[in-house]
Amino acid sequence: MHYKKVLELSITVGERLLFNGCATHRIEEQIHKILGVCPFTSEEVFVTTSGIVVTVDSPESGLMTMVKHTTKKGMNTERIALIEDIVINFTQENISVDEALKEIKGIADKSTYPFYIIVSAFALSGAFRSFMFGGSVYDSIAAVIVGLCVGITIQSLNTQKLPPFLVTLTAGFMVGFVSFLLRSFSVGTNLDKIIIGSLITFAPGVPMAHAINDILNGEQLSGIIRALEAILTGIAIAVGIAVALYFWRFLGGHVIE
Amino acid sequence: MIVLIEAVCAFFACLFFAIIYNTPKKELVYCGLAGGVGYTIFFILDRFFSMSLIGTFLGTSAICIMAKYYAASHTMPKLLYVLPAIYPLVPGAGIYYAMHDVMINDYAAAISEGFVAFKSVGVVVLAMLIILPDQFLNFKWVYEQNFLKEKMQEYRDSKNED
């Protein structure tokens, strides 16, 4: 038995899952599944949204601990599905430890959608949402334009190593400024519908639900970290729009509701 | 008519939102479908019966049940379908209005808007918490049927090779 390799595999899987936005209790399940392959006498797994600790013990291997710290996070459900597939294959002994490690490292570079599709997804999702809020068709068209600017901003700033707060703040600023600009050229009729529609694609509604779901599932620590992230995102958006408002007034524009 | 328009809009909104979460291409339509059904239930109950919290609860429940069915039949994680699909139900607009009220120094309105938003997030999570666990309604028979089908296919393939 390759005790060390199995431990390394389990912590790599945990790190990749965490990196792609998986829920922490789900990650613990997966790690326990992998560790179940070896006859460990005791296994302790502790996962928070910022790091993983795994300790195992058995007479053959001795006491082993591995810690992994992660900071940057994204959301990629396809990679989660692929990694869980590999875990199932590994536990059914279809593939060896080395093959599993290699495959998981291969998944890291796999990107699902090209840049322009994600940007247009931002735009179109915002447009439909602004129509659902009771905006007119012109509001939706304005929301498409705002959404394109937001998508380009978020996607291009995420590849730089900027703090997430700053990225969201810039995106909020773009939403406010471009909406004011479009409204002053009378594209669209309801300013708040345009802003809500294009804002909601990165507003922290879904992360907030994810966070409370974690807390109620008994993962208080990681739930609170996620909730704090969601609140910070909300504050960043508010600050961004406020900055846009003051900047617009500074330029001498009027805000038409 | 308006229900149909809202349903179609919710379908496409969820579908494009799922792209932002990097959902696999094959599953996009199902995310959209779950979101459309959930939002339609919410919309009917909210607009015609003015029961927005019950609507949110039932809509999220419908989403969770559909997500569990798809997860069993496609062997994918459940949250892959749930997260994009609850996107029209979580109160992004309420959070925005609360932030807007803070910006114009109307703190009383901000607090009331914020609590309404928080209540609806709470109801969404409550529904997820009650419906999502694997212990019941887990569509095991779908999973087993699929499993059997795959085994049969493998058997046939091996026979063909011989």
Image (cartoon, rainbow, N blue to C red):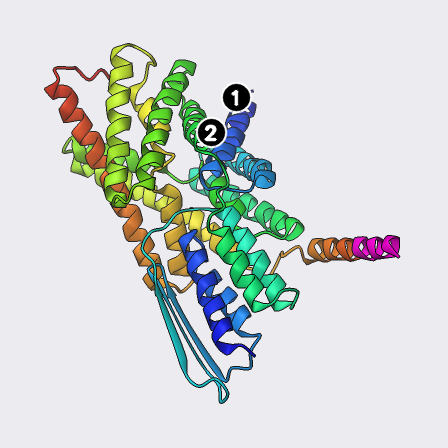
Amino acid type, callout 2: Arg
Mark 2 vs mark 1: give the one in front: 1
C-alpha separation, residue under disc 2 versus residue under disc 1:
10 Å
* A40 with respect to A167 (left or right): right
**Residue A173 percent across, percent down from the top left:** 23, 30
Say above or below: A51 vs B38.
below
Mark 1: few, some, or many residues within 10 Å (few <14, many ≥20)? Answer: few
Chain at numbered mark 1: B
Say above or below: A185 vs A45.
above
Chain at numbered mark 2: B
Say above or below: A131 vs B40.
above
Highlighted magenta segment, given as a residue range: B152-162
* A81 with respect to A12 (left or right): right
What residue is shown at x 64% (from left), y 49% (from top)? B74
What residue is shown at x 28% (from left), y 33% (from top)? A171
What residue is shown at x 35% (from left), y 37% (from top)? A202
Element type where label 1 sits in the image: helix
Amino acid type, callout 1: Ile
What residue is shown at x 44% (from left), y 52% (from top)? B126
**Residue B132 percent across, percent down from the top left:** 53, 55
State the residue lying farthest toward the top.
Answer: A185
Do the residues under discs 2 and 1 have CB atoms within 8 angstroms?
yes
Q: Main secondary structure of the magenta part?
A: helix
- Picture disc at residue B47: 2
Quarter placement of the N terminus of chain B? top right
* Residue holding disc 1: B2
